[in-house]
Each structure stands twice: as structure tokens, then as C-alpha cells.
Image (cartoon, coloured by chain):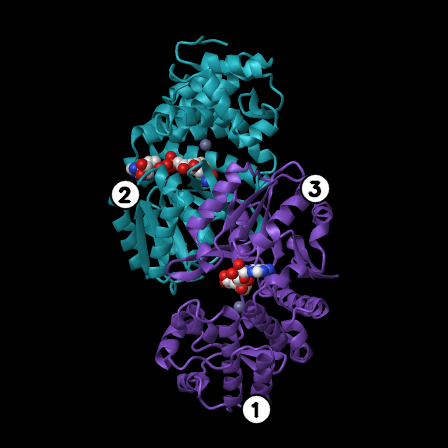
Chain colours: A purple, B cyan
Amino acid sequence: MRTVNVDLGERSYPIYIGSGLLSHIGQYFKDHGISLNSPLMIVTDDHVAPHYLTLLEKLLLEAGYDTVSKVVKAGETSKSLSVLEEVMTTAIEGKLDRNSTVIALGGGVVGDLAGFAAATYMRGIKFVQIPTTILAHDSSVGGKVAVNHPLAKNMIGAFHQPEMVLYDLDTLQTLPPRDVASGLSEMVKHGLIRDGDFARWCREHASELLALDPEALEYGLALGCSIKADVVSRDERENDLRAILNLGHTIGHAIEAVAGYGEYMHGEAIAIGMAGSARLAVRLGRDASIYDETVSMLQSLRLPVTMSSHLSTDDIMDAMKHDKKFREGHMLFIIPDSIGSVSIVKDIPEQLVRETIDQLREGGETHV
Amino acid sequence: MRTVNVDLGERSYPIYIGSGLLSHIGQYFKDHGISLNSPLMIVTDDHVAPHYLTLLEKLLLEAGYDTVSKVVKAGETSKSLSVLEEVMTTAIEGKLDRNSTVIALGGGVVGDLAGFAAATYMRGIKFVQIPTTILAHDSSVGGKVAVNHPLAKNMIGAFHQPEMVLYDLDTLQTLPPRDVASGLSEMVKHGLIRDGDFARWCREHASELLALDPEALEYGLALGCSIKADVVSRDERENDLRAILNLGHTIGHAIEAVAGYGEYMHGEAIAIGMAGSARLAVRLGRDASIYDETVSMLQSLRLPVTMSSHLSTDDIMDAMKHDKKFREGHMLFIIPDSIGSVSIVKDIPEQLVRETIDQLREGGETHV
Ligand SMILES: NC(=O)c1ccc[n+]([C@@H]2O[C@H](COP(=O)([O-])OP(=O)(O)OC[C@H]3O[C@@H](n4cnc5c(N)ncnc54)[C@H](O)[C@@H]3O)[C@@H](O)[C@H]2O)c1
Ligand SMILES: NC(=O)c1ccc[n+]([C@@H]2O[C@H](COP(=O)([O-])OP(=O)(O)OC[C@H]3O[C@@H](n4cnc5c(N)ncnc54)[C@H](O)[C@@H]3O)[C@@H](O)[C@H]2O)c1
Ligand SMILES: [Zn+2]
Ligand SMILES: [Zn+2]
């Protein structure tokens, strides 16, 4: 078992990572001062619930807690204000009070939704995350919670740090393979931005990671979380440094939007985006090995590094220009300087970006 | 012109109170660092808009600001998640960014709705209040913002302090008389909890206040705001002291709920509640003059001190028991010790409360 501390002053919290943690949840809750006198609410989705909800309810009951549960439909559409209202209905009917805690049992969708409910129920109550995806190692650090607006993702939200995160690796065993790879994309991203050795470790242990080997997962998730925690603790409210976490995301988000949400998983789209950033790096004069290494790392994790040929460069460029940060930064990208280190670069010539997008298309040139 | 500072460390802000302030809004905005480069959003309602929206838009345009406006239906029903989503649509279509500011032009409803939109748009942007009701002197201090859930009021919200509050007394001139009296109820409440001289001043200047005399309003609103600001700055997140602001509210909320929202205005219901608390005080052994003085103050402001005879004591008792704070506190009430000072008292015998409610009914006994 490993513990990663997210250091945010008064709002600091630990992430416990290991196998078999769930069965000790009662003790963890007591250690964190979760009151026995106020009901808890578990929020989960209908893919996760059949595997773990009854177990979690039983463990909490045995520990002396009253719980109510809300199961939402799996998928991004549950991150909406109307589902939030349903979650709030469960909270009110379950008589949650200002000392109650909301528990997110699931991936990033449930984490963001339940976290926003916790941030706003009675103007803010406690929150605990029990992540069940690899991608959630990313979303469980930093306190960003949100729902989507029909016109834009994550538009309505808050910063709300959890009391603790309980990452039981056993729950990952039922995760579909594409979700596994997609989550590993964010893991290797954490290596690429701050720790080259870790990025290389991900490549070397790719088969263990893909096979959900507990030892490899424990190490990889702990290191991924601690890199993100380090960045976030230096810049909690996303003023500056935190932007480096967006490596691959400008292109990635544009690909997700143009392809239509669903064709690419988030981790897949940002893998293509990271390949694009590495291409840009080389075009801007960084060492050519950056691109080759990045691609080999992503491919070892069975992640795509090119996008479907039906996606047009014009559409991708347009989608990127809708991104306000990108627009104000005048073609701002996170660009690798080497494996494990990145810079925030502005004013990249539009022509260079276009050519890079062209090359990302399947069947495009495979070297820079 | 008077300025009340709400002292909350980093989140401190001023409330400017006076006549003719709106015409200087451009200067106020610049002094407070409201950027010219990001669009602003004005949120108001359809009673207030015809009087002041065009003027405000024009003043901001002249000062060099881009604005978009959202006009919601007047009334409590606009404090909902679905109206929040509409407000967010306007913000997104108006291209508000992380440096934008949301302006609430209106009473407590618009303040709470727009404030919650500001608290959650892109996880929080700036907020300015331009209150146009007397009651809003209460809601503009303390940073509580919220929308309602169909099952409970103010259930979904946040703490989000404004950058500043611009209280232009000229805008109060169009306020309907019942709203005037209802707002004055919270003003005299601020006197009753912390400043007996101010409560007496309200009685002595009741006719000027009811006639919206600018000098009386300026003094009364400034003192009301500063009393609330003092309480809030000692207890920003409502842990303890802040509870005294609820004088009259336990009974008042129950009356509002049982009568059906709309029959009583909020200030009217809490006036009855304050009369009830004063009765309880005397029954608990405090000086009998507390009740007589309280009633004379409320009546001078044309506020009711008894409730309609069709409201049953059982229903009121039931409604109070739904209030969790009240329930956990075992019949907790804010009880005057003298005019200008209150205590938080627990474990008041239920029979005493029932008798007090009985006496609050129209035609009940007029003395304690
Ligand atoms: N808050 C943040 O900082 C942050 C960071 C990154 C991503 N996110 C958000 O996270 C979301 C994506 O996260 P995600 O990939 O975890 O999505 P997800 O929660 O939708 O999970 C992916 C799929 O796997 C299923 N699933 C989850 N755990 C499972 C398990 N153990 N066994 C079987 N099935 C399981 C889910 O039901 C879902 O169908 C997005 O909404 C994104 O915006 C937030
Ligand atoms: N956030 C807080 O701390 C806090 C404190 C107290 C009350 N509140 C909230 O405030 C709300 C009540 O506030 P309110 O009484 O100001 O309600 P309101 O905003 O509904 O205003 C009352 C009525 O007056 C109209 N109006 C407002 N200004 C006017 C003007 N200048 N001329 C003509 N008409 C005008 C409005 O359209 C409305 O019809 C409630 O929702 C309550 O929950 C919040
Ligand atoms: Zn991501
Ligand atoms: Zn009130």
C-alpha cells in the first residue's frame, strides 16, 4: 500500500493506493473523522454498481454508517445539471446534512458529478473518492469537479478537494481494456511532463500495466498521482504551471470534438495529441528522438498516435480556435523539451500547426 | 455616500451605499480591476429590467465594456437549476471567460442566482452586486449564493464573495411598498440582534424609511449591512455565531412553508417570527418589555406580528421539525436577552413553543 499526499495547506488530503483497501473502509472513514451521526450518499454508475455497490453498502453498514445510493447511467451524459438535480433529490430524501459525506464510486464521470454535488449541497459538504478507473488517478487529484453544459464540457463546476481518496486496485480488474489503455495515456503523460524515468518505466512495464498487474499498477498510479499532486500543490487554481497538465489536450480535445464524443476515448485522443506535440517539438528544433520515444511509449500502451483519415485539418483547426485559452495565448501549446520536461510555448506559426495536424492523419508520414 | 467594508481577509469587499452611484459605475469597475478585455454578463429580472437595464448597459458601454444580459422571470421560481442553465447559456454564447464578471442587478433572487452562476461558471469568476431591494442589504453581505431544489430552498449553492456591492438608493424608488416593509424587517432584525439603539432608530425613523427617504435609507442600510458584516466576518462559513442572524427565521420559515410561498413575504413571516421569539424570551424569564418593544418596532414598520388564523399550530410545529438545525439543536431558538442582544437557546420545552405559536395566531392574546 502506498500513500500519496496532496499538499494543499488546510485542504491537503491523502490518496491511499493498494489492493484490498475497500474492506477497511470503516477504519479509514473513522480515521478521517467521517461522522456516524450523519447519513452518507454513494454516487455511482450502472456499469460500476453491479460489481461494487452492494459490497460498499455492506461494508459501510457494518462500520455503523447509514447510506443512501444514487446510480446514474454510465457515461458522459450523466455529467449534467438535470442528473445533478436527481443526485440532490437523493441527498435531500436521504436527509443528508451539513456533516454528511458524498462518496464517488466510479471513474472520472462519477467523480466529477458527485464532487460537484458535494461542493454545492447545502453550500458544500465532505467528499470522498473511490476511483474505479485508471483515468481517475488524474481526476482524483486537484479538486476540479464539474458538470457539462449542452454547449461546452466542464463549464459548470467548482474546486472542491476530497477528504481522502481510497484507490482499491482490486476494483480495476473489471475495467474494459480500452478504458485501461485510455487511463494509461494520462499516466504516461505525467511522466512526459515531469519525470522521464517514469515515462520510460511505463513503456518497460506496459504489458504488466495493460494486464492490470497489481504491483505495476500500484507503482504507476502512485507516481502518476504524485506528479499531478506536485503540480497542483504549486498552482491549485490553475493560474500558470498547472497548464502543463494539458500536454496533448489542445489537439486531443479538438479531435474528440470533431470526431464526435464517443469515437475516441479521452486518453486515446490525447495520445494522438501528445504525438502531435512531440512532432511540433521536433519541428521547433528539439531533438528528433523526442518524437520517436513518445510514439514508442504510446504504442507500447496500445494507444493510437494517428487519427482517422476522415477528420479534416480545417475542422481540427477550427475546434482548437474555439478554445479560449489557446486563442488568447496565440497558438499556445505545451511542447516537450525532452522526455520528462515541457515548456509552454506561444505564437507557434499556424502553418506549422496545420502541417502537424496533416501528418497526424492515418497514412500520413510516419516520421517527422 | 457611505462605504461598509466586509472584512473577510483576502475575500474582503466594500459595499458602496448612496444616491446616484450607478452613473459612476465605470469608474468603480476600473478601480476594482474589472477587465475591459473580457465580456460582462448582467443578470436581472423582468420587473427590474424595464427600469434599469438599458441604463446600466449604456453606462457600461460608455465605460468601454462589452456586456450581455439575461432577464429572468421575477420571483423565487427563477432560483432553479434550469434557469441557472439558461444563465450559463447566455454566458457561454456571450463568450464570458475566466476574467469575466457577472453582475446581479436586482433583489435577493437575482443576487442568489447570478452569484451562484458566478461561483460555478468555469469553476468561479468574479461577481458584482447591484441590489435594488431593501432586503438585498441582507443578501449582499456574506457571500451565500444558491438556487432552490424542488424539495427545499437554497439547497444547492456556494459561498462566493462579490468584488464589490454598488447600492444605488435611487433604484429603490420603484420598489413596491410591501417589498419595502419586508426589507425593513431584516433591517430591524439587525438592530435587534446586535444594536438596540439602531433598532430604536428604525422605529423612530419608520415613516422616513417607509417613504424611501434617501438619508434615512443610507444610514439604515449602512448600519444594517455593517452589523451583518461584523457577524459574518467573525464566522464566514456559518459554524456558530452566524446563527444569530436567524432571529425570527425558525418560526418565519415554518410560516412561509405552511402558508404556501407567496402568502407572506419573507420579511413579513420573519416579523411574526421575531414577535414569537420575543414572546418566548418573556416566557423564559426575560423582561416583559422585550416583547412590547419588539412589537412596537415591527408595527411602526407596518409589519405583521400575528399570523393568519387558518394556520394550525400542528402544521407549524411539523414544519419546524423538518429544519435539521432546529431538530439537532433540540428546539433551538435565537432568543432576545434585551433589545439589541440575543442568545442561542437549546432545549426549549415543546409545550412552551406550542403555546407561543398558538398566541401568534390573529385574535390570540395580545400580551404575553
Ligand atoms: N476532475 C478532473 O480533474 C478530471 C481529470 C480528467 C478527466 N476528468 C473527467 O473524467 C471523465 C472521464 O473519466 P473516466 O475515463 O474514468 O470515465 P468514466 O467514469 O465514464 O468511466 C469509463 C467507463 O468505465 C466504466 N467503469 C468505471 N469503472 C469500472 C470498473 N471498475 N469496472 C467496469 N467498468 C467500469 C464506467 O461505467 C464507464 O462506462 C471525463 O468526464 C473527464 O472530463 C476529470
Ligand atoms: N444570500 C443571502 O444571504 C440571502 C439573505 C436573505 C435573502 N436571500 C434571498 O433573497 C430572496 C428575497 O430577496 P428579495 O426580497 O430582494 O426578492 P426579489 O429579488 O424577488 O425582489 C422582490 C420583488 O421586487 C422586484 N424588484 C426588485 N427590485 C425592484 C425595484 N427596484 N423596483 C421594482 N421592483 C423591484 C422583484 O422583481 C421582485 O418581484 C430570497 O430568494 C431569499 O432566499 C438571500
Ligand atoms: Zn485529460
Ligand atoms: Zn431572512
Q: Nearer the viewer, mark 3 or mark 2?
A: 3
Q: Chain of mark 3?
A: A
- Quarter of the image where the N terminus of chain B is located: top left
Residue annotated with mark 1: A288
**Cα separation between marks 3 and 1:** 58 Å
3 and 2 marks in contact (CB < 8 Å): no
Residue annotated with mark 3: A62
Cβ at disc 2 under 8 Å from ligand 2: yes
The percent coordinates of residue A326 (x first, y second) are 44, 73
**Cα separation between marks 2 and 1:** 62 Å
Quadrant of res B265: top left
Pointer 1: residues within 10 angstroms few (<14), some, or many (20+)? some
Q: Which sits earlier in the primary sequence, circle 3 or circle 1?
A: 3
Which image quarter has ligand 4?
A: top left
Q: Amino acid at mark 1?
A: Ala
Q: Nearer the viewer, mark 2 or mark 1?
A: 1
Q: Secondary structure at mark 1?
A: loop
The percent coordinates of residue A225 (x first, y second) are 65, 65
Residue annotated with mark 2: B46
Say whether mark 1 and mark 2 are on the same chain. no
Q: Chain of mark 2?
A: B
